Image: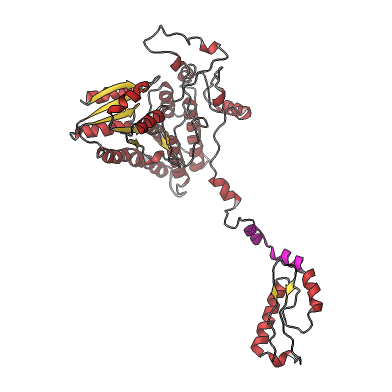
């Protein structure tokens, strides 16, 4: 009795084909040693081996020396046949990767770099407002827009009846952005969405054009105009993406009036749910953190923090608010007036004295422009200074930010992306005309003033 292996053991990519066998004294025909079922299984194995491109015999034969050389010779062709496109991609580690087209959709568009001359020239040709570049540009921030701030508002006011592609409501919002009448992330976002609502009400689809494409192009034109007036905040960018998504997803079966009514309802729902209702939820939770006798500190002017203080005062809690402010905008003064008018005890100081006043503080409430995907808080300049001083004094810091301001990107520092204000604003001190050391700073080539917002 002798044992013969039914198949050969082939190593893919190996140098040889290994065959294990045992010879007996007397060799009998194959039919006498195998049953009919075994022979059928053997034939199927041979067919499978041939389909894979292997010329090496799978059947057990007494003489295998003649088949060893062909097996080695056919090793390379068999590997080529086995290496299908799918298998090759799996070996490269890309088996689970999405196609290139899908991957490109996931990558966010790069920001406009204003040190790229070719792209800047193209942007100037498309721009509605002719802006003059600043002469003494800060080298570290050359990739950000730096323009003369005193020339844009008069030019926009003179072109009020000449800008046909821009809706009057959008034009008015842009002028108010540029003049500084509207400030704060929530207020700017609501003003923009309300301007878009007015433009959608007055919109009519041109002949031989589709509403979805034409209205999206209109919104893009409005957004470009608003960016020229003042760079968009992150929350405004999220709201614009929401509106464009709703436009694209409009059913083709809707009439123009139905589509417009749907978009107007979507904008109202966004304002109510994402901003107004979100602020109410923040206020309800934040008030529970305030105890009688607490001294609260806030920086600048945040609408969410203001609502927290007013609601805590309305329900009868006794506390004092320290308003920390900074030049040149001095936004904290407006918050101070509104809190004092409601009867809340307040203390006003500048950011250079924050380490002195922090001894008295129990809680710090700060607003935020955005929260990045890695948890970093993005807010007005000086917020990090206040938070670090509070951390040094072991004072808890609470950030009040709506969910629609959350952003999927990550910002490594304040240089890669920021908003630059008017340099003249920090060269002058209101009410102190005798401080005129920087009156002619623009004529000094080796002097650059940086005003981060």
Query: Which residue is drawn at the image coordinates 74% and 86% (left, top)?
Result: 23
Verify whether residue 400 appears in magenta: no
Can residue 271 be seen? yes
Instruction: Say how the picture is coloured.
Output: secondary structure
Decide which of 188, 390 is in the foreground and name it. Answer: 390
Compared with 29, 77 (above or below) is above
How far across and how far down the image is residue 157, in percent?
45, 19
Q: Front-most of 137 and 354?
A: 354
Task: Point out residue 366 in the picture as x, y percentages from the top left corner.
Answer: 34, 32
Q: Main secondary structure of the magenta part?
A: helix
In the rendered image, residue 100, in percent from the top left (x then y), is placed at 60, 50
Q: How many marks do you count on the picture?
A: 0
Q: Quadrant of residue 396?
A: top left
The residue furthest top is 434
- For the record, the magenta segment spans 75-91
Quarter-of-image position of residue 53: bottom right
Residue sitting at x 66%, y 90%: 35
The vertical placement of 228 against 272, above or below, is above
Q: Is residue 269 above or below residue 53?
A: above
Q: Is residue 89 magenta?
A: yes
Residue 172, located in which quarter of the rendered image? top left
Residue 186 placement, left or right of 437: left
Q: Position of residue 90 (x, y in %)?
A: 62, 59
């Amino acid at each position: 009795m002798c044992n013969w292996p039914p198949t050969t053991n082939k190593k893919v990519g190996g140098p040889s084909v290994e065959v294990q066998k045992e010879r007996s004294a007397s060799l009998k025909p194959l039919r006498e040693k195998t049953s009919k079922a075994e022979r059928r299984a053997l034939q199927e194995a041979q067919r499978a081996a041939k389909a894979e491109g292997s010329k090496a015999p799978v059947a057990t034969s007494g003489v295998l020396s003649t088949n060893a050389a062909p097996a080695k010779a056919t090793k390379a062709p068999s590997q080529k046949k086995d290496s299908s496109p799918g298998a090759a991609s799996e070996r490269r580690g890309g088996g689970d990767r999405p196609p290139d087209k899908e991957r490109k959709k996931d990558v966010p568009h790069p920001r406009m770099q204003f040190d790229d001359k070719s792209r800047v020239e193209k942007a100037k040709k498309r721009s509605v407002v002719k802006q003059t570049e600043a002469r003494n540009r800060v080298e570290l921030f050359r990739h950000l827009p730096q323009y003369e701030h005193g020339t844009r508002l008069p030019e926009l006011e003179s072109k009020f009846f000449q800008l046909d592609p821009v809706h009057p409501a959008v034009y008015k919002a842009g002028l108010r952005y540029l003049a500084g009448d509207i400030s704060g992330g929530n207020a700017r976002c609501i003003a923009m969405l309300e301007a878009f609502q007015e433009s959608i009400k007055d919109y009519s689809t041109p002949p031989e054009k589709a509403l979805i494409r034409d209205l999206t192009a209109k919104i893009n034109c409005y957004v470009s105009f608003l960016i020229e007036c003042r760079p968009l905040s992150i929350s405004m960018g999220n709201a614009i993406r929401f509106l464009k998504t709703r436009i694209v997803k409009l059913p083709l079966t809707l009439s123009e009036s139905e589509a417009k009514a749907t978009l107007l309802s979507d904008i109202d729902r966004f304002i109510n749910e994402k901003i107004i209702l979100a602020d109410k939820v923040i206020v309800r939770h934040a008030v529970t953190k305030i105890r009688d006798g607490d001294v609260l500190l806030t920086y600048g002017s945040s609408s969410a923090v203001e609502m927290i203080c007013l609601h805590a005062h309305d329900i009868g809690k006794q506390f004092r608010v320290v308003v920390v402010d900074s030049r040149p905008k001095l936004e904290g003064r407006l918050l101070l007036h509104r809190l004092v008018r409601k009867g809340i005890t307040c203390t006003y100081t500048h950011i250079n004295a924050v380490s002195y006043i922090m001894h008295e503080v129990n809680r710090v409430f700060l607003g935020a422009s955005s929260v990045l995907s890695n948890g970093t808080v993005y807010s007005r300049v000086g917020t990090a200074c206040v938070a670090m001083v509070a951390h040094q004094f072991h004072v808890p810091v609470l950030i009040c930010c709506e969910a629609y301001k959350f952003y999927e990107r990550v910002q490594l520092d304040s240089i890669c992306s920021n908003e630059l204000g008017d340099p003249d604003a920090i060269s002058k001190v209101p009410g102190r005309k005798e401080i005129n050391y920087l009156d002619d700073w623009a004529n000094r080539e080796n002097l650059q003033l940086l005003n981060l917002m």
